[in-house]
Structures are given as structure tokens and as C-alpha cells.
Image (tube, helix red, strand yellow):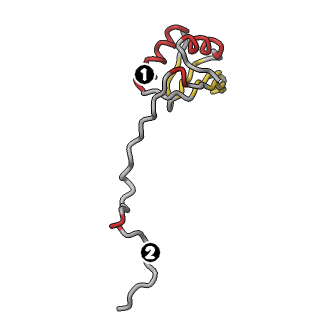
Amino acid sequence: MRENLFEMGANLNDGWSSDNKDKEEKKETATKDPEKHRLHFAREKRNGKIVTIVKPFFLSNDILEVLLKTLKKSLAIGGTIKDNTLEFQGEVREKLQIALMKLGYGIK
């Protein structure tokens, strides 16, 4: 039998995997001090309602949840966490800027 001159595919001994289900776990983002954050504010309209978005936060999820809870309670607004961003109901940019600056976060 003749030797194959053109070999297709990867050699599995070189660290390749034949199964694409082996996924790497998400890496934790490096945390920063509040003073080193430079937060951006955005406003979106979703289903006819305004949403204020604050990003990017370089905090662990536990600290981000505590920050969200304190901001929601002090400003009496609703909000949620999505991918290291905080989303708040309504147009509350000025209130958020004041509250975050009091907590020591940098605003851009």
C-alpha cells in the first residue's frame, strides 16, 4: 500500500484534542482599587424605557454584588449585574456619579 503524501488533520500527540467539549473555565478578572477605576456611563432605550449602564468594573462578583446592593438602596432604584457592568433602571447618571465618587471610584 502506498504511503499518504498529504496528511489531513492534527496529530493528537501534539496537545490537540479531538473533542471540542473540553472548554477552559472563565478566568477571573484582576481586581483594582476603586481609585484606579475609570467608569463610563451609557444610556440605552430598551422596550421604551431608559437604562443607565456603568462599566467596566474590575471587581470580584461578591464585591460587585455588595456595591450594587448599596447603590440600589441609597438611591432607591432598581438594577442588575451583567458581565462586570451595572445596569440601573431610569436615567440616573448624575445620582450615580455622585454616589460612586463618594465611594472613591474614578469617573471618566
Residue 80 in picture, x, y percent from top left: 50, 22
Q: In which quarter of the image is the N terminus?
A: bottom left
Q: Quadrant of the C terminus?
A: top right
Label at residue 63: 1
Q: In this view, does 9 lie above or below 96?
A: below
Label at residue 8: 2
Q: Which amino acid is tagged 1?
A: Ile
Q: In this view, does 5 lie above or below 102?
A: below
Spatial separation of the CA atoms under disc 2 and disc 1: 49 Å
Closest to the observer, 92 or 35: 35
Q: Residue at x 55, y 18 (%)?
A: 105
Residue 71 in picture, x, y percent from top left: 51, 13
Residue 88 in picture, x, y percent from top left: 57, 19
Query: In this figure, what is the number of numbered marks?
Result: 2
Q: How crowded is mark 2: few (under 14 residues within 10 Å), some or many (20 or more)?
A: few
Residue 29 in picture, x, y percent from top left: 45, 34
Asked which secondary structure carries label 2, the reply is loop
Q: Which residue is drawn at 52% across and 27% down?
A: 57
Q: Which of marks 2 and 1 is in front?
A: 1
Q: Which amino acid is tagged 2?
A: Met
Q: How crowded is mark 1: few (under 14 residues within 10 Å), some or many (20 or more)?
A: few
Q: Residue at x 59, y 20 (%)?
A: 106
